Amino acid sequence: MQINNIGVYMNKFALLAPAAFLAAAHFSPAQAQDELIYVAVEPCRIADTRKSAVGVIMANTSRNFLIAGTAEDMAVQGGVVDCLNPKGDVSPVAISAYILAVPADSSTSQGVLTAYPSDLPPPPSGSGSTVNFAKDQIIGNTTNVTVCVDGSCPSDGELAILARRTDEHVVIDVQGYFYPPTLIPGYEIVQAAFATAGSNTLTAEAICPAGKKVLGGGGSLAVSSWFLDGSYPRPDGLGWRVRYKTSGATFSATGVAWAVCAKVN
């Protein structure tokens, strides 16, 4: 299934991400089998090795990074401000982050940055690529990365970054955190299947149960020739709408619209 959109209704609300999204984003099966709550934050720079005392990540070595903390914690990694966990003492199981590869004076070739949980071994060579870069190229990628969770985590961080082939600097801006769904009691996901034939546009919506408002939503399609043209809450706040168009000769499609609903005072 192709996941075309995840919408956020309000930045301070949490958004529950379906397992299909997590699987498509290369989460491990164990972590993708349950739905998770995504909490968006203002992008926060947790690391910049150009500004850290440790400096560049050497070729074919990895370094661990804290994914949240005070400005003092972040300074060790090259961060400059508080990047606090929005759920306090509840540990996230994954993050959404922009990871930037920056060449160092000692960089000698193209290479790959690979992000992975710090309590696991690095993915084998040829897999697990997060950012591919050419020699002297500055390039980044927004990605979702599982992280180490409680107990087994090294003290220097839940996230590991491996630099393959050459020395490389890395900059990491966290954009959100994924949490277990128990953090929002009373939430409910509503899914509505849809199908269309003989048309080049479609609109579908998922409606919240009586007494509940929509917090977020999105949609998915199984046909790659269709693309998302809009994703937004209904004007009355009682559901989520998605709108698609087709970019090819396929004029039929099936998919699912979904809404995250809860009682909102």
Image (cartoon, helix red, strand yellow):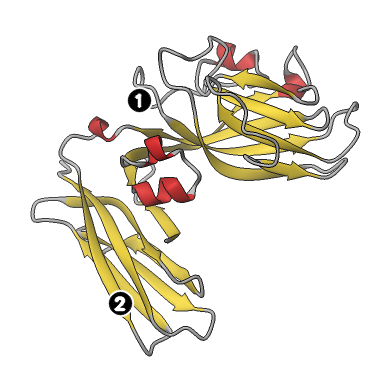
Q: Residue at x 41, y 29 (%)?
A: 93
Q: Is residue 10 above or below residue 195?
A: above
Q: Amino acid at mark 2?
A: Ala
Q: Is residue 206 above or below residue 202?
A: above
Q: Position of residue 56 (x, y in %)?
A: 78, 22
Give the residue number, with chain letter if any, for mark 2. Answer: 195
Q: Position of residue 104 (x, y in %)?
A: 85, 29
Instruction: Examine the image and state in which quarter residue 244 appears.
Output: bottom left
Q: Earlier in the sequence, mark 2 or mark 1?
A: 1
Question: Is residue 10 or residue 142 the one in the foreground?
Answer: 142
Residue 157, numbered circle: none
Q: Secondary structure at mark 2?
A: strand
Instruction: Examine the image and state in which quarter residue 15 appears.
Output: top left
Instruction: Examine the image and state in which quarter residue 206 appears.
Output: bottom left
Q: Amino acid at mark 1?
A: Lys
Q: Residue at x 74, y 38 (%)?
A: 112
196 relative position to 116: left or right? left
Q: Secondary structure at mark 1?
A: loop
Give the residue number, with chain letter if any, for mark 1. Answer: 87
Quarter in which the C terminus is drawn: top left
Residues packed near mark 2 inside 10 Å, few (<14), some (14 to 19) or many (20 plus): few
**Do we see residue 13 in this rendering?**
no
Quarter in which the N terminus is drawn: bottom left
Looking at the image, the residue that sits furthest to the bottom is 198
